[in-house]
Image (cartoon, rainbow, N blue to C red):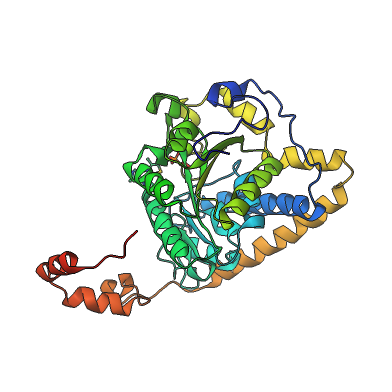
Amino acid sequence: MNSSTVPPEPMGLELNHKTILGLGRYQALDIDGMQAETLAGLLRQMLRLRRTEEAILHEYHPADEIRCPVHFCIGQEAMPAALSLLVEAEDYLFSHHRTHGYYFAKGAPMREFFAEIYGRVTGANQGRAGSMDISHEASRFYGGAILSGSIGIAVGAAYALQHRHSRQISIAGFGEGATEEGAFWEAVNYAGLRRLPILFLCENNRYSVYSDQTKRQASDNICERVATFGVRARRIFGNDAALTHRTLQLEMEAMREGGGPALVEAYTYRWNSHVGPEDDSDNEYRTVEEIAFWRQNCPIRLLEEKLTAAGRFDSVRRENLESEIAAEIAENFKFAKSSPFPHIDDWRTANWNPASPLADRLLETLTESEFDQYQAEAKLAPY
Ligand SMILES: Cc1ncc(C[n+]2csc(CCOP(=O)(O)OP(=O)(O)O)c2C)c(N)n1
Ligand SMILES: [Mg+2]
């Protein structure tokens, strides 16, 4: 396959925001040939993420103990679930502000997640980052609220991996709104030029806050534009967890063998407000029909129904799964709420990264003119 072509959509339908609504109840979910372990894993990961989000949503108000802004990803569980089964511990994963799915996809601990959003010292970032900027270094997971900012960092990580001749890959997860930032196109250009091992995951949920993509961009064709940079690009119906898994598997395996960068654009939908547990639909930026379409195509329901019809899932397994997840969530809530808040004496130290003492020392001693001199004399490795 030529790296600059967009392969046909798996359903043979040209997917875009208009055609997708004509699908009605999605019928194309195909589990043939997929391992039982993969299918069970997809369902488990999606349900765990959904229940975790619902629990936070209910706890947010009126308790008001979670003080950071929270961007829920209810409705968008298929991509992180598929990713969680394919990503390796040594891969890097960089996420935008809607972090939760990606945090769990990388296998980062629920305990430190809850403690972080409650602002406690036992959190992944000692309670200082909250939901939008949560990172878990040991899991090689990094979140970031600056739209498209983490994509550039993901490209840097991919560059380092390429230099080390590693089979590991760098992954950047973001929404279609991030593709309106210049930094995104710089990242795509450099990734295509250097054939970096980076997977761009664009969860296209149509909206950037309240603004419709079709009113922000001349065309609903991110894949075509990205492909012109020499980055393989493929769009899928993102609520089909089986298809998402097959697509990511294909791309990630190719990338580990030196196949170069790729983008997967998954059409999906957030059920809640852009941010917070409130319902932001009172300004009518989304139609009732559109919301109904996506709710009837809930990624969990689509997979569960298929598995049940195939005799591979039943109500007993469902109940077991539900109670196991509920117990895990309850235990972690308890841990978070009973943890202490951080005690911060000095904001300078609090914001200083102790992981880079050499860089900090050099920065403290370096003057601007020395830096210019260094730049002028630097012998950069040839490409
Ligand atoms: C550089 C920058 N500009 C603006 C914002 C404010 N902002 C936060 S989220 C968001 C919308 C992002 O939409 P999208 O990328 O589609 O992701 P989604 O929220 O839909 O998941 C905006 C504009 C920001 N965080 N950073
Ligand atoms: Mg969006």
Residue lying farthest to the front in this orientation:
382
Q: Up-down: is 50 above or below 359?
A: above
Q: Residue at x 40, y 48 (%)?
A: 193
The residue closer to the viewer here, 273 or 253, is 253
Q: In this rendering, does residue 164 appear at all?
A: yes
Q: Residue at x 38, y 76 (%)?
A: 355
Q: In this rendering, does residue 269 appear at all?
A: no
Asked where in the image residue 295 lies, by quadrant, the reply is top right
Asked where in the image residue 226 lies, by quadrant, the reply is top left
Q: Dividing the image into four equal quarters, which quarter contains ligand 1? A: top left
**Quadrant containing the C terminus in the rendered view:** bottom left
- Total marks drawn? 0
Q: Position of residue 172 (x, y in %)?
A: 48, 51
Q: Up-down: is 152 above or below 219?
A: below
Direction from residue 316 to residue 263 in the image, left or right: left
Q: Position of residue 142 (x, y in %)?
A: 46, 60
Asked where in the image residue 356 lies, by quadrant, the reply is bottom left
Residue lying farthest to the left in this orientation:
369
Q: Position of residue 343 (x, y in %)?
A: 38, 76
The residue closer to the viewer here, 81 or 336, is 81
Q: Position of residue 334 (x, y in %)?
A: 61, 67
Q: Residue at x 84, y 53 (%)?
A: 317
Q: Residue at x 45, y 58 (%)?
A: 158
Q: Up-down: is 55 above or below 208?
A: below
**Quadrant containing the N terminus in the rendered view:** top right
The residue closer to the viewer here, 67 or 141, is 141
The residue closer to the viewer here, 364 or 318, is 364
